[in-house]
Image (cartoon, grey):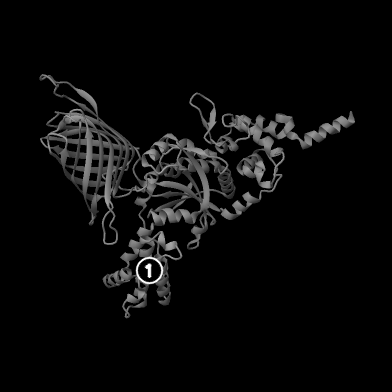
Amino acid sequence: MIRGFFVSLFLAMCLPSALGSSHPLIKSAIDKKLYQSPEWKNLLHYQKNFFGGFTSEAIGMSFFFAKNGRKNPKAELVATLKAFINPGKIENYDQHPICRFPSRYLYFKDKLGLVKNTNCPKYDAFVKRTAAKSISLVFSSYYLNAPASAFGHTLLRLSKTPTGKKVPEGGELLDYAANYAAMVTTSNALLYGLAGLTGGFNGEFTAMPYFYKVREYNDYESRDLWEYQLNLDQKQINKVVAHIWEMGQTTFQYFYLTGNCAYHMMGLIDIANPTWRLTERTPFFVIPASTIRVAMETPGLVTKVLFRPSKKKQFFASLKKLNKSEYREFEKLTAHKNPNDLSAGLEKSSRARILDAGMDYLDFTYSKEILLDKSVANAWKRKFLIARAKTGIRTKKEKIPTKEVEMPHRGHGLRRLSLREGSGNQYNHFTQFEYRFALHDLMDATAGQSPYSTMEMGNAKFRLTDWEKKSRGNGLRAKFRLESFSLMRVRALNTITKRSKKWSWRAHFGTKTIKDRDCVSCFSPTAELGFGGSVAPGKWLFSLLLAPEFNANSELGHRGFRAGIGPELDVFYNFAENIKLKVFGEIKTWQFVKRDYSYRYGTDFRWGFKKNWALDIAYTRHHALWETSTGLLFYY
């Protein structure tokens, strides 16, 4: 009997998992209902199902210990504790469950007093390598040249400098970044868009030196970086770092408009403090700028906003420091890339400014080549550096000033509703309702937005007319109809300067109501493109594009479609960042229809009288048809 007692005691000590939920720690966890806690649901990324219950957004089954752990928080909690207490046979320390899932261990340590019973060499090395003392939420500005980055991008920077302390010059490049992105499996733009919208890609978390993201966004793509420093203590930081490590154990379905980088960065921050409920407060359709605003609206979360200008901005800031004679010397320097071309009589301070601008020019113009040891651009920069050192001038790196109004969170709401009343010679009166899913057009207030771009998705306009001629007879009737729908409308007006000569372009895919001589009030699928140039002297912006267009409707001639091309001129004047005037005109020649040309012109005035409210007055003429309207716009 006594021998049986000691055998039982031995088994209880060595094989606690065999006791199942009767183990004291497991029983305590169940009694405390930890599986229902927000912390546990955040750690496993559980979300409520529409008809009840929970499902984890993680899809890699190695992320779970219980067979039904993806849909059963309680079963997963019990299975995790069993694995932590009795991991079974493992080949090395790093395979221990606690080493694979350190943030779950920290949770059980805090709630149950679980004691760590293993070493974790790889995880400990990761913690030492990141050495995180503070964390920032980083927003990379909008980039229309890549569909995945058209709405911007967010990531976390794990800084070695405590919050409130000054970062040594260049020290941030030694920090680490936590990133979430799609594992893209196609280069086809159409398939990419379809897969991104429907969850056809897997998404993964990666941790990498912050330097790589700075090079990619700040340098290669000339995108500004905005860093929102988070108010986290060291214990909260440790939780986030531990969770970043264990996110490498799984993948997620990547959804371009829902389960994207912005959404999952909120999930990481929620690990630090579940009472913030950042993921829960994030809109269902989420874009990076919306999560920045959620963070800013959380009391006490953001302590400071820092700005890292793109290489392009740094270069043009260097040019502004040069006087006329120095600029002429700069042109000689960059023409032949030879510092010996500079005039011998230059003062050392002038020579230093010119060479500084020259190096910024090389960094901006040859951003990719300059890092290659044997590249020509790298050899040029070495010569510039040697010449710069010979001046003996030590200049303090000046910060590029940025206005508070330019910060991403200061902009108007990301969605828009509008009500418009109008009249014309086709209708005595009409009322138009509009909904825009995202994001911005050139007439909207530019605060927090790219000043020379339009990026719209899901823009639907519905119109109620007070009368319309019937197809037969002279009777009149009211009609409610879809006036237009833009699946995507993009306009990137890259302004031409002496040092930057990129093309301006635009694209539109959707439907619209045609209002010209070929087909009055025909509803037509439409595809439009445009390429040309833009200049922006002072408060003016001029854009001239050559734009092909395709329309389809059964009433468009005997073929039921038409194709055309022609010039489009847009002139903008900015009275202020929230008061704008636009005058536009276009003419197109058409093929496959009876009428060989059409034209359209008009004007638009918009006044953003409050942050999320604007008044719009517009006039448009299509041949003999004209209409004028006044609209009230609300952004949210």
- From the top left corner, tell me how far across and down residue 449 is, in percent: 33, 47
In the rendered image, is residue 345 in sight?
yes
> Which residue occupies 40% across, 75% down?
387
| Identity, as a three-letter code, of the amino acid under mark 1 | Asp
Above or below, comparing residue 600 to residue 48 in the picture: below
Residue at the image point whose x is 72% and y is 38% from the top: 86
Task: Give the residue furthest to the right.
Answer: 2
| Residue 79 coordinates in the image, percent (x, y) | 65, 33
Q: Where is the C terminus found, in terms of image quarters?
A: top left
Q: Quadrant of the N terminus?
A: top right
Q: Is residue 353 left or right of residue 125?
A: left
Q: Residues within 10 Å of mark 1 (few under 14, many from 20)?
A: some
Query: Which residue of the protein is positioned furthest toward the bottom in this rendering?
Result: 345
Is 348 rendered above or below residue 168? Answer: below
Q: Quadrant of residue 430?
A: top left
| Residue at the spot 55% in from the left edge and 42% down from the top edge | 271
Q: Would residue 578 be found to the left or right of residue 30 on screen?
A: left
Which of the 4 quarters of the picture holds residue 91? Answer: top right
Count of numbered marks: 1
Lateral position of residue 190 relative to residue 68, left or right: left
Q: Nearest the camera: 250 or 632?
A: 250
Residue 197 falls left or right of residue 610: right
Q: Is residue 285 visible?
A: no
As helix, strand or loop, the secondary structure at mark 1 comes to helix
Task: Residue 444: give x, y in percent of width and height.
Answer: 28, 44
Q: Pointer 1: what residue?
A: 356
Residue 510: x and y in percent read 28, 35
